[in-house]
Image (cartoon, rainbow, N blue to C red):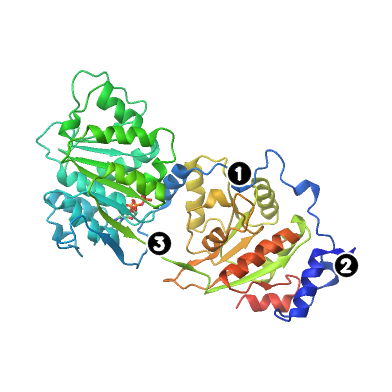
Amino acid sequence: MATDSWALSVDQQEATTKIFEVLRIRESRVVQNAEVKETEKPTDGDKSDEEEKEDRAAQSLLNKLIRNSLVNNTNQVEVLQRDPNSPLYSVKTFEELHLKPQLLQGVYAMGFNRPSKIQETALPMMLAEPPQNLIAQSQSGTGKTAAFVLAMLSHVDPANKWTQCLCLSPTYELALQTGKVVEQMGKFYPEVKLAYAIRGNRMDGGSKIQEQIVIGTPGTMSDWLTKKKVIDPKKVRVFVLDEADVMIGMQGHQDQSIRIQRKLPEDCQMLLFSATFEDTVWQFAERIVPDPNVIRLKREEETLDTIKQYYVLCRDRQDKFNALCNIYGAITIAQAMIFCHTRRTAAWLSAKMAADGHQVALLSGELAVEQRAAIIDRFREGKEKVLITTNVCARGIDVEQVSVVINLDPPLDKDGNPDNETYLHRIGRTGRFGKRGLAINMVDSRQSMAVLRAIEEHFNKKIVKLDTGDLDEMEKIAH
Ligand SMILES: Nc1ncnc2c1ncn2[C@@H]1O[C@H](COP(=O)(O)OP(=O)(O)OP(=O)(O)O)[C@@H](O)[C@H]1O
């Protein structure tokens, strides 16, 4: 039986190629049966993370709820100007923008000392006279919301008691988040009023509303403009479409947004923001924003250069748990993130580890977004030491201080192929910080081994075999 084992054949292959260190495998830890036990195979109701519905709106909200500062980015901003002959302005201070004093006060009260990378170029364009149209793309947390909120507040004439700025958000919750930024930044500018065009906010129609800024979702906004007629589209000066990449994934939002845009005057300033820029987003953006200036800020590149990568051969999930205990027994781990393929395995592992005395947090897809945000927040504050999660649940979440990442299963994309991008995102570090990290992959079948080999080949970075039962070896990985 042992000779049939995939794990032994992996060993044999490695022994012959001499690429890997020959390791002492204790008798008790030799993997003899590669078959995943029946009980551990995903069943109905035990969806793999790839099968869980990816909810971009929820991810985006989660990011907003847990973030309290800018994401670092040292990449250069790419600018494509509508009029290549006009000079390109960028600012290093908020003073240079000649903001209204009440707004400058609001900006400083929020703790902003200087414009973020994207704001340096986007703000002068948005505040220029005559106002310019803009499509801007940069990852979440780089200061887009703050930028367009400042632009809306700057363009409002508070003496005019009618709606002058419209802002579309994909969901009710995201609209409320943007509204909070308007309230914070406009704290010293109380003459400017804000209304939410979101479900539940009923309008009887008849007279026009007086709020200068209206933030809402496409459905209700369109209702207020066309059926209820509480906003005169011809008086709108600034139109913002936020989270375009999330918007296009939602039923009907794209068409409604375009219909709204068509009602606005030609000289209305059109601004569109997105965290990503797939072709579909770009096509949508071009329909919303005529003659745009385009600003893009590339994501800071993640690298595997400073990460030590290992894999551990395991029989089954119990064996993976034993390996985890060995790892915890041998090295001091301040905080770790553990990724599982299924929710059920994540729940199982979290119960096992908690019973073993670990302070564990389980991030699960069943939880409401706010509950997930609270869990990540507690982990970030160090109240829990282990965060166990599936991939979909954790997608887009960066927990910088984690130096140990454990893949209980190697990541697969939705077609079951090796998911290099997810692997990089889980364990990679943005080049700038260059922190050293440790990544340990558990492997319990030929297929998983093949996935890991493919990932290894893709990044051309060795993933070294580790025997968690060998204390000497375990000592070494800690340093
Ligand atoms: N110039 C600045 N200086 C310091 N902090 C800032 C600045 N601009 C924005 N921030 C803060 O950085 C965080 C991210 O900003 P913001 O929400 O505007 O980014 P975003 O690109 O819109 O991302 P998301 O879409 O996820 O909200 C927020 O906590 C915000 O208050």
Ligand 1 position by quadrant: bottom left
Relative depth, front residue between 101 and 249? 249
**Residue type at numbered disc 2:** Thr
Q: Which residue is mark 1?
A: 51
Q: Is label 1 in a helix, a strand or a loop?
A: helix
| Mark 1 nearby-residue class (10 Å; few <14, some 14–19, many ≥20) | few
Q: Is disc 1's CB within 8 Å of ligand 1?
A: no
**Vertical order, 119 against 433 (above or below):** above
Query: In the rendered image of this protein, does residue 194 appear above or below residue 379?
Result: above
Image disc number at residue 10? none
Residue 126 horizontal/vertical position (percent): 20, 51
For the N terminus, give its image quadrant: bottom right
Q: Is residue 401 left or right of residue 476?
A: left
Q: Residues within 10 Å of mark 3 (few under 14, many from 20)?
A: some
Query: What kind of residue is marked 3?
Result: Arg
Label 3: which residue?
A: 299
x, y (%) of residue 109?
23, 53
Q: Earlier in the sequence, mark 3 or mark 1?
A: 1
> Against 49, is 168 above or below?
above
Q: Which residue is mark 2?
A: 3
Kindly identify the residue that appears in the image at 52 percent across and 49 percent down.
375
| 3D distance between C-alphas at marks 3 and 1 | 27 Å
Quadrant in the picture for residue 263: top left
Between 293 and 428, the residue placed more toward the observer is 293
Q: Mark 2 falls on what kind of element?
A: helix
Left or right of residue 301, residue 297 in this image: left
Q: Is residue 187 visible?
A: no
Instruction: Give the image quarter of residue 164.
Output: top left
Residue farthest to the left, as pictured: 159
